[in-house]
Image (cartoon, rainbow, N blue to C red):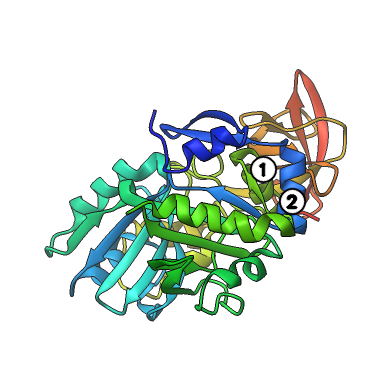
Amino acid sequence: MKNTPFTHKHIAMGAKMAPFAGYNMPISYTGINDEHATVRKAAGVFDVSHMGEFILKGEGALDLIQRITSNDASKLTAGKAQYSCLTNEQGGIIDDLLVYCVEENKVYMIVVNASNIEKDWNWFVQHNTAGVEMHNVSEKTCLLAVQGPNATKILQALTDMDILNLKYYTFVKGTFAGIKNVLVSATGYTGAGGVEIYFEDQDGAADKIWDAIFEVGAPQGLKPIGLGARDTLRLEMGYCLYGNDIDDTTSPLEAGLGWITKFNKPDFTAKPILQQQKEAGLQRRLVGFEMVDKGIPRHGYEIVNAAGQAIGYVTSGTQSPSLGKAIGMGYVQTDFADLDSTIYVKVRDKQLAAKVVKFPFS
């Protein structure tokens, strides 16, 4: 198992640790519900240094990104980021990712899921037919997500960069907590506001930044948060988790990611297949649902109709800490995907009623 530059901090702070994507990661500190509430009401720090980062440089960088991702990266100007995905030849999702435009048409950073670093890198290499300069900087890049309504107010004291007024999906680069060349972006995976902080761990930068954040933040209620609460926070927003809600067999259209699938841009992997899927109509769709009957939906549970016939499966589910009710996501046949449709989750041979609702859950 790999460690991040913050593993010793997590252990010293009493985190419950567990393997995740090959890394020894903190799952919780004080408990998922408490940590979840901290992020919704104040601010929390997630170590997400296990994520992958690729740097693409040169004249062909944008063209490479355009050919293998679903969104239109040509719309990006320096300082802007974009949510996108890599599609395979069958129209499935290799990974969902972020594209950062560092220098227009010349320098881009791609941020990918930890479990897919090698697979994604190989896909970029395979399609790099124009000699784009590529660097896999995953191993040396630290990433902290500071999320919550008070996050930017707390962090502004550590930098001259204006992060208080950073617009969603934009970023700045500069000095943070005395460390140079730090990238701060208004992205996140919680729906609670905040930023993500990228930097290289040179000369003890990881310890310096971590300590500085907690020095200014702890008196204002900032706490370390584990991956358990990260999952419940993203699920309340209806954000997809790779390996659960999206994978190589699900298309972006089925997953409700039509908004990052741009058919008006030049050809990209599986564009004709996805166009055909759109024109013919989807056979299934990813929906959000809340439980009507008592019970918690779990990944892999079968979804059935009133007659007990299989119509889909649960991809994610939990007892929502903020809402106090059981919620889930899952693929169902299109006939059952309309809002307020009644579906049934099979839990230990029982059919428990649930209602299709819109994202984010409320």
Q: What amino acid is labelled 1 in the image?
A: Ala
Of 148 and 265, which appears nearest the observer? Answer: 148
Locate residue 170, reporting x and y percent.
Answer: 49, 74
Of the residues under marks 2 and 1, which one precedes in the sequence?
A: 2
Quarter location, residue 63: bottom left
- Callout 1 secondary element: helix
Task: State if disc 1 and disc 2 touch (CB < 8 Å).
Answer: yes
Residue 169 appears in the picture as rendered: yes
Q: Name which residue lies at 31% across and 68% down.
A: 108
Q: Name which residue lies at 16% across and 64% down.
A: 132
Screen quadrant of the N terminus:
top left
Circle 1 is placed at which residue position?
229
Q: Name which residue lies at 56% across and 29% down.
A: 17
Q: Is 331 left or right of 40, judged from the image as shown? A: left
Locate residue 319, reporting x and y percent.
Answer: 78, 38
Q: Which mark is residue 38?
A: 2
Q: What amino acid is labelled 2 in the image?
A: Thr
Q: Name which residue lies at 37% across and 80% down.
A: 78
Screen quadrant of the C terminus:
bottom right
Q: Is residue 158 above or below residue 77?
A: above
